[in-house]
């Protein structure tokens, strides 16, 4: 039963990551390997806040904001388009600096947890669109392979930065609520409930976003037919940035959720992200519900195999893909050209 | 000739390097060579074939561990004990094992379309890596040590400067054979994998086989690299065979230029040197506190990708204005044997009650017609009448929901298009399906695929050259026949659309068909070009070839064809001689709207 709980809660995290990966891939064709880094950054930034320190990630935000401001600012000046300069500098220069000043002004360790989480999100989530702007937008038209290699480069940079920011020590954050609920024989950890509950809320929220809001519909249109969407006036740049914003939100939030359950190191993100991948593959990188189901399956398999055959845990999880791929290959046998 | 001189110069440079450079650089060159060997395989697999693999490091590991176990273990079971006698026997055993694993993994994962594949390779790449670290007979995390050095003719290669020669001999052999392979009949099939699968299948290429072939070749290269690595280090442990290294090999191929064989060597050199220099210099600048080299490395990679998307090698080629020499066409090469065409008037194609539904839409309903050898039949009808669907079913690209198609005396319903191609049917595509970066000559040569038989190994070692000459000569003959000899060596993508349609015809003709299917061949042609095309088709008809034509240009059709089948809303509404069709009221109504 405890194993089942562990499995479901890590499954819920993998589901969020899988959703983010599916989203990014279908809109921008980027296989976003650094997704796991957002998880690690989220958990570790929150841990630093709780320890009463100003998280170093805020300086990353300032630096990347400055790069975006310079690059885009120069491009705007060249085109003599001064209209958007205000919001460009506002979001990429003023906002990060204000946030840094705020963090120095308050004593983050003493804040209520809700505010600490809000600060973590405020620092990290804007990094998503900035990464898209700097790393992917200039090569948005190239092949999936080149985009993939760019992803790996971003992953390396972020892992290296993670070591600089957080050191080699792992950290664990305080749980949202201590204790557990008991139903007769069965006791359920409260943190597990938090994880599952908020993941579900997130998934429902996303579904609403995609079916109800204009931006959500625009993203879906881009995913189905990029050139058609472009002709309808949906800018691929805006779509890309929005997707990365959502993915960053999902990743950082997963990090906040997982922080109290396991110790996170600066490089933990990679394996967590990969398991999100496994889930996404089960969903065929296209279907959200299947990806979520796959994630729970991966989580359960992982926690049970860590109990029965811990040495082979990773082997089992990653070999799980093969039968799924097999099943898929038997179900698709028409010839098609790619790209 | 020039190429041979260049190669000899390269040999000479490589030969004197270990004498001139300090041992540190020789060691570095050894690492570069081993990585380049893996990256050459990836160029073939990923750059040319379009199949991305993150798992190559695992194959390197299989090669390294096989030789480590075989050459150090004292208690081998009897059936394999022979392989422990020498590293060379262990290499052979490793290649066999790797080949089998690659066949198994390939048959499981290669059917998947592009995006699943890289993820699938991550899966087995990680699984194999964790197995290396957990299995006891592989030494678990501490690995296996005490491997013997490789020896050649009694000389044992236990110094870095000695194994250097062996490593670079392997690299050069890999580069040259890969180059040769790509420039051959099999190579054209491999190059069609990226973006030309439907076309290649219609020309008789077994694309699933080509995929497996390059997958196994890439794995064998990796295995050989692992063998060299193990005997250079004299010990193995799991860490160099993890996913990160698999990714690094892919880096090398992409940075060097994923579609170019020499790009693999350049990329391996660049990435290895960059890594090494950053590791040497950055700690001096920033201290040892952080892992700064990985950050700078990532940034530099991004910069390279942004500045040279295609990689360094093509950028260098452009910088020095190097252009590939046009292929030599040997006109004196003996002509290829021709197919014996069926006797004029014999029924060659029969379409019986063919119906094709797409969900609720009935694209073809109860279609019936037949064709005789030496006849030109036109299939006409308004847009959306189902002509292209009919075409795709006849050529095996699509399968009828019900009904039967008989070609050359055999029921071909539901068969693969390449089997139908083998029976003598060849087609052009309405939406041009050429490989735009390949020359016109090579595009047309894909059509000759079924008329040659040179396999992978003979191609890699240039033992199929006489046949290759004949294939290219045949392709050139067909290009002259359709009047495009001026563009023989141009990139196919650089030609006008009308000319590209003509290349499609030349490619179909290169297959020596008994039935030729042409989908709107006259679209985009000028008057003179249309006349020339009509002339060509009449000549083919005189030879006894049957031609089925979809066309909108009525002047072109009426003056040329023997019979016409008219379709509307998926059904046949009329069939007959051109003069009859011109008078047919239902046809007039379909084209001009009903007369009230």
Image (cartoon, coloured by chain):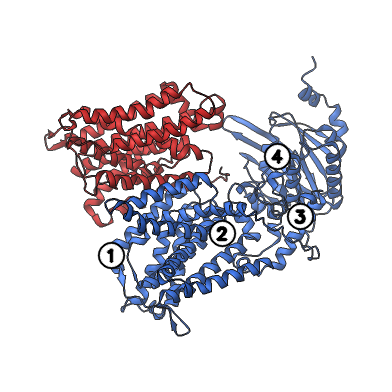
State which chain disc 1 sits on: B
Query: Which residue is the site of mark 1?
Result: B140
The earlier-in-sequence mark between 1 and 2 is: 1
For disc 2, the chain is B
- Chain letter tied to blue: B
Instruction: Tell me the mark number nearer the camera, choosing from 1 and 2.
Output: 2
Mark 2 or mark 3: name the one nearer the start of the chain.
Answer: 2
Cα–Cα gap, marks 4 and 3: 20 Å
Judged from this view, the residue extending furthest toward the top is B596
Which circle's residue, 4 or 3, is located before the other in the chain? Answer: 4
Q: Are marks 3 and 1 on the same chain?
A: yes
Q: Which residue lies at the image location 29% right of the left edge and 35% below the top edge?
A: A58
Write down which chain is painted red.
Answer: A
**Label 4 vs label 1, nearer the camera:** 1
Indicate which label's residue lies in the foreground, 4 or 3: 4
Q: Secondary structure at mark 1?
A: helix
Answer few, some or many: residues within 10 Å of disc 1's Cα (few below 14, many 20 plus, some between 14 and 19): some
Task: Return the residue nearer the eye: B582 or B68.
Answer: B68
Residue where numbered disc 4 is placed = B430
**Where does residue B53 sit, x and y in percent of width and height?**
46, 53
Residue B24 in view: yes
Q: Earlier in the sequence, mark 3 or mark 1?
A: 1
Q: Are marks 4 and 1 in contact (CB under 8 Å)?
A: no
Residue indicated by mark 3: B512
Residue corresponding to mark 2: B261
Q: Residue at x 59, y 67 (%)?
A: B457
Nearer the camera: disc 2 or disc 3? 2
């Amino acid at each position: 039963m405890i194993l089942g709980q562990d499995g479901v809660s890590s499954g819920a995290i993998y589901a969020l990551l899988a959703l983010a990966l599916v989203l990014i891939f279908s809109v921008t064709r980027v296989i976003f390997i650094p997704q796991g880094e957002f998880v690690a950054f989220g958990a570790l930034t929150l841990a630093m806040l709780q320890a009463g320190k100003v998280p170093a990630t805020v300086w990353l935000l300032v630096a990347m904001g400055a790069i975006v401001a310079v690059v885009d600012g120069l491009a705007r000046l060249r085109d003599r388009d001064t209209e958007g300069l205000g919001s460009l500098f506002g979001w990429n220069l003023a906002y990060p600096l204000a946030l840094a000043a705020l963090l120095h002004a308050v004593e983050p360790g003493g804040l209520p947890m809700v505010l600490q989480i809000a600060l973590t999100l405020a620092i990290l989530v804007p990094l998503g669109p900035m990464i898209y702007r700097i790393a992917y937008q200039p090569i948005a038209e190239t092949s999936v392979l080149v985009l993939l290699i760019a992803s790996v480069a971003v992953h390396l940079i972020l892992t290296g930065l993670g070591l600089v920011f957080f050191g080699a020590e792992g950290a664990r954050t305080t749980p949202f609520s201590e204790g557990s609920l008991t139903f007769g024989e069965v006791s359920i950890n409260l943190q597990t409930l938090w994880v599952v509950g908020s993941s579900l809320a997130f998934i429902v929220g996303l579904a609403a976003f995609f079916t109800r809001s204009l931006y959500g519909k625009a993203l879906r249109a881009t995913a189905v037919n990029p050139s058609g969407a472009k002709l309808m006036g949906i800018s691929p740049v805006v779509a890309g940035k929005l997707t990365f914003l959502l993915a960053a939100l999902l990743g950082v939030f997963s990090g906040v959720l997982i922080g109290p359950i396991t110790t996170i190191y600066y490089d933990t993100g990679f394996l967590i992200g990969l398991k999100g991948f496994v889930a996404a593959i089960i969903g065929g990188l296209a279907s959200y519900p299947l990806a979520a189901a796959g994630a729970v399956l991966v989580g359960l398999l992982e926690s049970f195999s860590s109990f029965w055959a811990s040495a082979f845990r990773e082997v089992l999880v990653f070999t799980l893909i093969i039968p799924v791929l097999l099943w898929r290959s038997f179900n698709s046998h028409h010839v098609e050209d790619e790209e | 000739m020039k190429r041979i001189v260049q190669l000899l110069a390269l040999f000479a440079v490589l030969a004197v390097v270990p004498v001139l450079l300090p041992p540190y650089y020789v060691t570095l060159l050894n690492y570069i060579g081993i990585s380049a060997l893996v990256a050459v395989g990836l160029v073939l697999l990923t750059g040319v074939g379009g199949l991305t693999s993150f798992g190559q490091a695992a194959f390197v590991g299989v090669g390294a561990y096989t030789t480590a176990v075989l050459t150090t273990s004292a208690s081998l079971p009897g059936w394999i004990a022979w392989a422990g006698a020498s590293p060379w026997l262990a290499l052979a055993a490793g290649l066999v094992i790797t080949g089998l694993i690659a066949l198994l993994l390939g048959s499981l994962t290669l059917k998947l379309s592009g995006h699943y594949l890289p993820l699938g390779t991550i899966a087995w790449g990680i699984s194999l890596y964790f197995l290396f670290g957990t299995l006891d007979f592989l030494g678990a995390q501490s690995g296996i040590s005490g491997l013997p050095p490789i020896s050649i003719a009694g000389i044992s290669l236990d110094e870095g400067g000695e194994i250097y020669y062996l490593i670079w001999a392997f690299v050069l052999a890999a580069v040259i054979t890969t180059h040769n392979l790509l420039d051959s009949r099999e190579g054209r099939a491999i190059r069609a994998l990226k973006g030309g699968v439907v076309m290649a299948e219609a020309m008789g290429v077994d694309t699933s086989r080509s995929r497996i072939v390059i997958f196994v070749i890439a794995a064998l290269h990796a295995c050989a690299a692992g063998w060299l690595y193990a005997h250079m280090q004299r010990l193995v442990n799991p860490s160099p065979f993890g996913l990160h290294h698999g990714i690094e090999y892919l880096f090398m191929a992409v940075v060097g230029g994923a579609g170019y064989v020499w790009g693999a060597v350049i990329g391996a050199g660049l990435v290895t040197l960059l890594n090494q220099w950053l590791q040497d210099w950055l700690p001096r600048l920033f201290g040892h506190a952080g892992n700064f080299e990985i950050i700078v490395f990532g940034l530099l990679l991004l910069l390279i990708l942004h500045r040279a998307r295609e990689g360094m090698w093509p950028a260098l080629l452009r910088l020095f204005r190097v252009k590939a020499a046009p292929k030599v066409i040997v006109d004196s090469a003996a002509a290829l044997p021709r197919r014996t065409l069926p006797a004029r008037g014999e029924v060659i194609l029969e379409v019986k009650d063919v119906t094709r539904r797409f969900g609720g839409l009935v694209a073809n309903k109860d279609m019936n017609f037949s064709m005789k050898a030496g006849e030109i039949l036109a299939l006409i009808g308004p847009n959306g009448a189902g002509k292209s669907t009919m075409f795709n079913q006849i050529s095996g690209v699509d399968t009828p929901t019900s009904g039967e198609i008989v070609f050359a005396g055999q029921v071909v319903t539901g068969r693969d298009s390449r089997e139908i191609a083998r029976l003598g049917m060849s087609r052009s595509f309405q939406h041009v399906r050429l490989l735009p970066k390949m020359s016109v000559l090579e595009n047309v040569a894909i059509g000759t695929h079924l008329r040659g038989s040179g396999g992978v190994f003979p191609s890699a070692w240039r033992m199929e050259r006489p046949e290759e000459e004949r294939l290219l000569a045949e392709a050139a003959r067909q290009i002259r026949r359709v009047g495009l000899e001026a563009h023989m060596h141009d990139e196919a993508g650089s030609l006008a659309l009308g000319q590209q349609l003509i290349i499609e015809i030349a490619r179909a003709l290169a297959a020596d068909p008994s039935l030729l299917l042409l989908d709107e061949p006259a679209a985009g042609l000028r008057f003179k070009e249309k006349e020339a095309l009509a002339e060509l088709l009449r000549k083919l008809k005189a030879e006894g070839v049957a031609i089925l034509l979809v066309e909108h240009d009525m002047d072109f059709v009426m003056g040329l064809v023997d019979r016409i089948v008219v379709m509307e809303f998926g059904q046949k509404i009329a069939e007959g001689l051109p003069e009859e069709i011109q008078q047919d009221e239902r046809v007039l109504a379909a084209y001009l709207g009903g007369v009230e």
